[in-house]
Image (tube, rainbow, N blue to C red):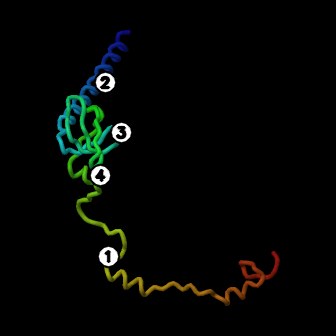
Amino acid sequence: MLLPFIVLIGAMFLMTRSAKKKQAQAAEMRNQMAPGTGVRTIGGMYATVKEIGDETVLLEVAPGVHAVYAKNSIGAVLEDSEYNRIVHGDEPGEVVPDDASSLTEAAEESTEDVKADLTKKTDAAEGDKDGKADGGTEAK
């Protein structure tokens, strides 16, 4: 009789403990915000922090466009490299070309030798005078 009650209290303790941890992590993340930092809101909008108030944050969502958000609406504070990669499309590392023009010359030479034969075969068409695919003229 006492065991289910103890299990219930233990489960409640564990749930509140994990919720407090998440709240502490969110508060720490919001404390990392500074003017010029890139952020993602909980709605998925990417913006740059302009000013930080007690409960609000002024975000620049586009050049010259500012919006006031609650601090609780900031979902993530992003590193500069991650923000630039997502918002501006800056890709660090190897650049992959959009077309095949920069491939090696050896691959181009090998494709020049192979040509497709697109001519119509007239002797095959003459063999199928009855229109049947098997070439036979008898009914089966």
First along the sequence among labels 3 and 2? 2
Which quarter of the picture shows residue 43? top left
Residue 51 is marked as none
- Percent position of residue 128, x then y: 73, 84
User: Percent x, y for residue 57?
Assistant: 24, 35
Tell me which residue sits at (73%, 82%) in the image. Answer: 135
From this view, report whether residue 88 is shown above or below residue 35.
below
Q: Position of residue 114 (x, y in %)?
A: 45, 85
Disc nearer the start of the sequence (4/2): 2
Q: Which residue is mark 2?
A: 15
Mark nearer the N terminus (4 vs 3): 3
- The amino acid type found where label 3 is placed reads Gly
The amino acid beneath tag 1 is: Ser
Q: Within 10 angstroms of label 3, few (less than 14), some, or many (20 or more) residues?
A: few
In the rendered image, the residue lying farthest to the front is: 64
Which of the two residues, 51 or 125, is positioned nearer the viewer here?
A: 51
Q: Which residue is mark 3?
A: 43
Q: Quadrant of the C terminus?
A: bottom right
- Quadrant position of the N terminus in the picture: top left
Q: Secondary structure at mark 1?
A: loop
* Residue 48: % across, % down: 24, 45
Label 1 environment density (alpha carbons within 10 Å; few <14, some 14–19, many ≥20): few
Q: Circle 4 sits in a helix, a strand or a loop, which is it?
A: helix
Whether residues under marks 4 and 2 lie with C-beta atoms below 8 angstroms apart, the answer is no
Residue identifier under label 4: 87
Instruction: State the residue position of label 1.
Output: 102
Q: Amino acid at mark 4?
A: Val
Cβ atoms at labels 3 and 2 below 8 Å apart: no
